[in-house]
Amino acid sequence: MQPHREEREQAKRVTAAILMRGREVFIAQRPAGDRLALLWEFPGGAVEEGETPEACLMREMHEEFGIRVEVLSLFGKSLYRYDHALIDLWAYRVRWTGGRLRPRVHAAVAWVPVRELDRYTFSPADLPFVHRLRSELDTK
């Protein structure tokens, strides 16, 4: 008999951008055919081997939207288990520094007033950030 070995699933590190324009936030809808098809998210992507989360976010925003961003600060973290993976999502406040917005991957994008975020169906891992943004708005 072999000793019992506890296996720990490695969470996949993913980043998300909290890109504000006044009281509006930039969101993107995942494409049809995706595992999370047509759900809305704060855009970003998976951290590659040897890459920092900040570098990942800058790369992803350029690759997926054609814009350059400066990563300002960590906004929050969300750990969520989907059927296909355990996701460790790190959201950062970012500032748009250049480039012209040209979505290349997503089904749709939108600048949404924070108070209207509940009109969109977000991926579960992104929901804590929706709630935090709404909470911050309510305290102002």
Image (cartoon, grey):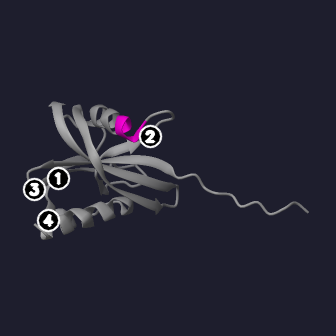
Asked if labels 3 and 4 touch by Cβ distance under 8 angstroms, the answer is: yes
Residue 21 visible at all: yes
Magenta stretch holds residue 117: no
**Residue where numbered disc 4 is placed:** 137
Q: Which residues are magenta?
A: 52-56
Task: Mark 4: give few (<14), some (14-19) or many (20+) Cα within 10 Å.
Answer: few
Task: Quote the CA–CA distance across marks 3 and 2.
Answer: 28 Å
**Callout 1–callout 3 Cβ contact below 8 Å:** no
Q: Secondary structure at mark 4?
A: helix
Category of crowding for the residue at label 2, using alpha-carbon neighbours closer than 10 angstroms: few (below 14), some (14–19), many (at least 20): some
Quickly name the residue at label 3.
23
Which residue is tagged 1? Answer: 25
Residue at figure coordinates x 40%, y 53% from the top left: 89
* Magenta stretch, main secondary structure class: helix
In x, y percent, where is residue 111?
14, 51
Residue picked out by circle 2: 47
Query: Residue 27, position in %: x, y?
Result: 22, 51
Q: Amino acid at mark 2?
A: Val
Q: Are marks 4 and 2 in contact (CB under 8 Å)?
A: no
Q: Is residue 115 above or below residue 64?
A: below
Residue type, label 1: Val
Q: Which mark is residue 104?
A: none
> Quick one: which residue is furthest to the top in this view?
99
Q: Earlier in the sequence, mark 4 or mark 2?
A: 2
Q: Earlier in the sequence, mark 3 or mark 2?
A: 3
Residue 119 visible? The answer is: no
The residue shown at (33%, 44%) is: 44
